[in-house]
Image: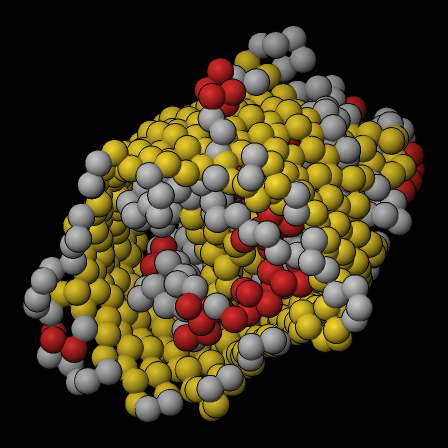
Amino acid sequence: MTTTLRLLVAVAISGSATSPAADLAREIEVLEEVVITATPLRKAALLTAQPVFALSGESLLRARAASLGETLASQPGLSASSFGPLASRPIIRGQGGLRVQTYQDGADTLDAAALSDDHAVTLDPLLAERIEVVRGPAALMFGNAAAAGAINVITPRIPIERLEQTLQGGLEVRADSAALERAMIGQLAARLGDHLQLHVDAHQQRSADLHIPGFAWSSTARADAIAAGEPVDLSRGRLVNSAGEADGGGAGLAWVGERQRFGVSSSRYDSEYGLPGLGEEAGEPPDIRLRMTQRREDFSGEWQPASGAVTVLRLRASRNDYQHVELEPTGDVGTRYAQLGTELRLSGEHGDAIGTANGSRGAFGIQVRKLDFDAEGEEAFLPPSVTRNAGLFLFEEREFGALTLEAGARYEYQTVLDYADDSFSASLGAVWSMREDLSLSLQLASTERHPTATELYAEGPHVAVRRYEIGDASLGTETGRSIDLGVRWNTADAYAAISVFITDYRDYLYAKPSVVPDDLDTEGLSLVRYVAGDARFTGVELEWSRPRLLQTAVGALGLRVFGDLVRAADGAGEPLPFIPPHRLGAALSLDGKTVGIGLEAIWHDDQTRVAAAERSTLGYTMLNLELSLRPRIAGRPVLLFIRGSNLLDEEARRHTSALKDYAPLAGRAVSASLRWTF
């Protein structure tokens, strides 16, 4: 444990002394008051046409895992890639990687996670106070790369929100038997006089190889290798070379006034983890490791004029120095990736004073970003490149009684090597409050997405994901047209929501599994080519919860039901690759005064709608049991959460993972989290 971590004794996040059911009830009651900063006008989730939600409080504590992808994987409309305990990225409505942007406090993470599933997102979920998710196009706020959605992780690192106490903080620890994980984070925040505020934090995480139920390789992969006369990995019981560790910390200082507030922070993130699934079939020994370092600086400022058309101006700036190396079994560096990223966003909001009719509001802004990427080594499948983006956006809304109309547009220009082009995205939305507790939302969006350096210029073996990638420098912008219809019902003791979406793409860019030609040596790896073509995504997400369904002598019995499905096909009607299967879940909770108990089951269907040269995936059911306890330590509330996961010890493989046939999810395991605040 680091010296800094020993000194820190607080987690500066709001503690909750409630059970799962009571916590859910509280979240339902305040749902309309929770401001989603990932929306243009920072509105509550129920008041915007965009399908958004936030995970916070005890719900976030229960969902927390070693990576951002695993933390969100069970939420409606979301899945995750799977590359061991530390490397897992979120997938939204069947799309991930280059189409899902990850943000920290409203600024791009600026790491290289989107380039490949084996690159971890440089955010520790233990640091999150709230995680906001935009399901569907988020290009207006976050740029053309957020064509499928965006994840915004809210942290306390820039302490520009006025602290309630002179000194506050806490400590959170976590352990998990699946990979013998041990994790801890400490945070401390203090007011230094009338205006200055300080925040410091440190975190540490260690995990061993992941425990799995059965063979690492699927039965299909083993059979195919035997039939082809190739070596077979017969390891079982654990996912070889999936162990990892991560350390980091940060400090922030802010000045908070009545109408102005601004702050800065500096942070670091270091990790090292193995790349599982690389057996002899891929031509590599199974002990290649990835070592990552990141140094980041952030600035956030806000000014509220006393009068005039503009009600608030915000400035957000970030600089991120990221690099990682892939270590050979000898300890030598095989491949090195480095990226220096910078981003600047100036945005504002206006009210009626700008000259619009009563009931009108708007947001506007400019965003510039630069990514200076370099790669060298025997597996550098991408050339060095500098990607520059500059965007302008405008968003307006107007109320007509119970009806609120929204409209927005964004213009963006991108250059990378010999590619240069502009894009235009726009949206129209409406929210109709049919009753005080019932609303109907509709959003139409048109988005254009530029190809990335990977899609344009990839050429060579990408051993970590067991494939040989070939880009196409002639690719142009991708155009998507989407419609999203949602119904939301919210009362004092129940919540229900259903969302249906359709997205049609022209020149949809994706990695298509292909047959290896005789004149190409892929070194035993499968071949994918980045291609463009028509595509359609359709799907539905639903959730219904009632935490006080029945009052018993022990406590309140609650029920939650949720599910999602997505279908994706190309212009010829053939399935697209890596699309998650249908999913349905239910959770029972019992809320007592000092103890909370929850039982959850999530069924994942078989995925047999697969692309050419793609294997199908068997379904599975995750059965989980939860226990919440609320003791007190030194007179302060403590929340102890214990969870039994995959109690049926099922072999579970995510179809969205490039390594689904070589790296399954964890088997039966027990995890525990403890949070103490003061």
Q: Is residue 179 above or below residue 306?
A: above
Q: Is residue 156 above or below residue 604?
A: above
Is residue 222 among what the camera can see? no
In the image, 268 versus 394, the foreground residue is: 268
Q: Position of residue 438 (x, y in %)?
A: 51, 85
Q: How many marks?
A: 0
Is residue 506 toward the left or the right of residue 564 in the image? left
Question: Which residue shows up at 8% across the image and 66% down it?
Answer: 307
Q: Position of residue 261 (x, y in %)?
A: 20, 47
- For this rendering, which residue is in front, 49 or 137? 49
- Vertical placement of 440 versus 112: above or below? below
In which image quadrant can residue 311 be found?
bottom left
Please give left or right for residue 349 compared with residue 164 in the image.
left
Foreground of the two, 141 or 464:
141
Quadrant in the picture for the N terminus:
top right
Q: Position of residue 605 (x, y in %)?
A: 80, 62
